[in-house]
Image: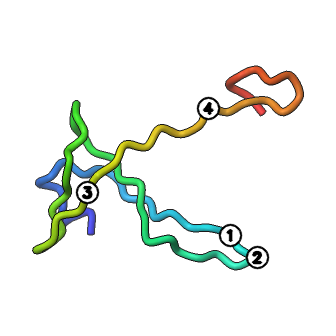
Amino acid sequence: MQETLKDQKLVEVRKITRNIEDKIIATGAAIITFDLFYRPDTLKLDWERVAVDEHIPNPIRCVNCQKLGHT
């Protein structure tokens, strides 16, 4: 899939999974990394256009001291 989307400046695709009752289940969503300064609104997949939303991960936070950057 990544090779066919190189013209859209796609770098990496990671599929999102959930662990439910000790079973790994695919969610149908993916985290996509682009080599762009801006986030495109849509991604062209063959004949279909897919909406692209921004994902900002939560910072790593320590459970003991509540400081950021370490666990």
Q: Which mark, by number, is residue 51? A: 3
Residue type at tag 3: Ala
Q: Which residue is mark 4?
A: 59
CB under 8 Å between discs 3 and 1: no
Q: What percent of the width, then of the height, locates residue 2?
A: 26, 63
Q: Residue at x 20, y 47 (%)?
A: 41
Figure quadrant of residue 23: bottom right
Determine which residue is flagged by label 2.
22
Residue 29 image position (x, y, % from top left):
43, 65
Outermost right residue: 64
Label 2 with label 1: CB-CB less than 8 Å: yes
For marks 2 and 3, give the CA distance: 31 Å
Above/below status of 54 relative to 50: above
Q: What colour scheme does the image use?
A: rainbow
Q: Earlier in the sequence, mark 2 or mark 3?
A: 2
Residue tagged by mark 1?
Answer: 19
Please identify, in this view, whether the residue under mark 3 or under mark 4 is nearer the observer: 3
| Location of residue 12 in the rendering, given as x and y in whole percent from the top left corner | 35, 53
* Amino acid at circle 1: Asn
